[in-house]
Image (cartoon, grey):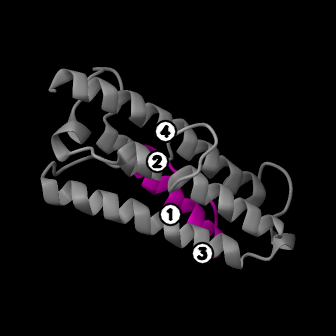
Amino acid sequence: MNESLRIADQLHRSFFSGAWQGPSVKEALAGIDAASAAMRPLPEAHSIWELTHHLRAWIVEADETIRGKRYESIKGDRDWPPVTDTSLEAWQRALHSIEQAALSLEDAVRALPPEKLGEGDKSYYYLLHGIAQHNTYHAGQISLLKKLASASHP
């Protein structure tokens, strides 16, 4: 297995299943309804829905960068896209969209020649490991918010 395939595997584990630290993003999001996703059990924290949009934004940025777009560190509403519709249909679209983005990134990484990964903090290697870490970090936050939300309305 080459390094690109190993990184694709880590991205898959952090998003879909098999993460070493605990639940993946998809596992953490499982069973969350639209009302719980929009809820703010901690007033100063982001909602699960906001975290989902934020994760997708960075997964898409990494995917587009691997596919040739010039990398930029996204900010503002691009970093934290606002939640403007809290309907069940909008939540289902958000879940589908983030999953499709994760699959697209995995495909791009699998096709990336390992010699293009590079080194240092401006490399694809650094960006992709950062995305796996980012997924893991926010999966933990989502898991905690999910517990708080279920305690708020059993």
- For numbered disc 2, what is the local secondary structure? helix
Residue 22, percent from left and from top: 55, 38
Identify the residue position indicated by label 4 in the image.
Answer: 138
**Residue at 62% of width from left, 67% of height from top?**
65
- For numbered disc 1, what is the local secondary structure? helix
Answer whether labels 2 and 1 touch (C-beta < 8 Å).
yes
- For numbered disc 4, what is the local secondary structure? helix
Main secondary structure along the magenta-highlighted residues: helix
Dot 2 or dot 4: first in sequence order is 2
Dot 4 or dot 1: first in sequence order is 1
Identify the residue position indicated by label 1 in the image.
Answer: 102
Dot 1 or dot 3: first in sequence order is 1
Dot 2 or dot 1: first in sequence order is 2
Q: Which residues are magenta?
A: 56-79
Residue 98, percent from left and from top: 40, 60
Identify the residue position indicated by label 3 in the image.
Answer: 107
Distance Cα–Cα, label 4 vs label 1: 14 Å
| Residue 89 shown in magenta | no
Amino acid type shown at disc 3: Asp
Mark nearest the camera among 2 and 4 is 2
Q: Which mark is residue 115?
A: none
Distance Cα–Cα, label 3 vs label 4: 22 Å
Q: Which mark is residue 25?
A: 2
Dot 2 or dot 3: first in sequence order is 2
Determine whether, in the image, residue 144 is placed left or right of residue 115.
left
Pick the residue in front: 154 or 111: 154
